[in-house]
Amino acid sequence: MPQVTVPEETFRQLAAKAAALDISVDELIRPALARLAGGDTSAAEPSPPLTGDAWQAELDAWKRDAEGRAGRYPAGFVLDDSRETLYREREDAQL
């Protein structure tokens, strides 16, 4: 059987996600590999909403990903995520 090498951190994240879903890493990545290979032309079934440990695993993975990008921003960078900024166009349209 062919083998693929993935970075240790990536495998650790995949293993955590698979464990939270109570499946093997192979079962977790098989659909994605089939899509990449072009062998799966059927529409993927929507997955049920995550709950409990699976949801927490997704949140933790998202946080790790965001923390990994922190070095890309200049020192002192602060994102303006205020409500006024996010909805400015909507508020302007009401005037």
Image (spheres, rainbow, N blue to C red):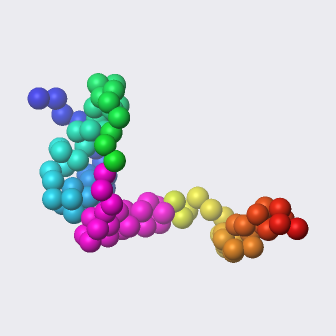
Picture coordinates of residue 7, whole percent (x, y): 30, 48
| Residue 64 belongs to magenta span | yes
Asked if residue 47 is positioned above or below residue 82 in the image, the reply reads above
The magenta stretch spans residue 67: yes
Who's the residue at 26% across and 58% down the image? 17
Q: Which of 63 and 3 is in front in this view?
A: 63
Quarter that holds the N terminus: top left
Residue 74 can be seen in this image:
yes
Q: In this view, does 83 lie to the left or right of 35?
A: right
Q: Which residue lies furthest to the left in this view?
A: 1
Which residue does the image show at 72% across and 67% down from the upper left? 87
Stretch in magenta: 47-68
Rendering quarter of residue 13: bottom left
Question: Measuring 33% from the left and 60% from the top, which residue is drawn there?
Answer: 49
Q: Give the main secondary structure, helix, strand or loop, of the magenta stretch.
A: helix
Q: What is the quadrant of the C terminus in the image?
A: bottom right
Foreground: 60 or 55?
55
The location of residue 65, given as percent across then percent down, is 44, 60
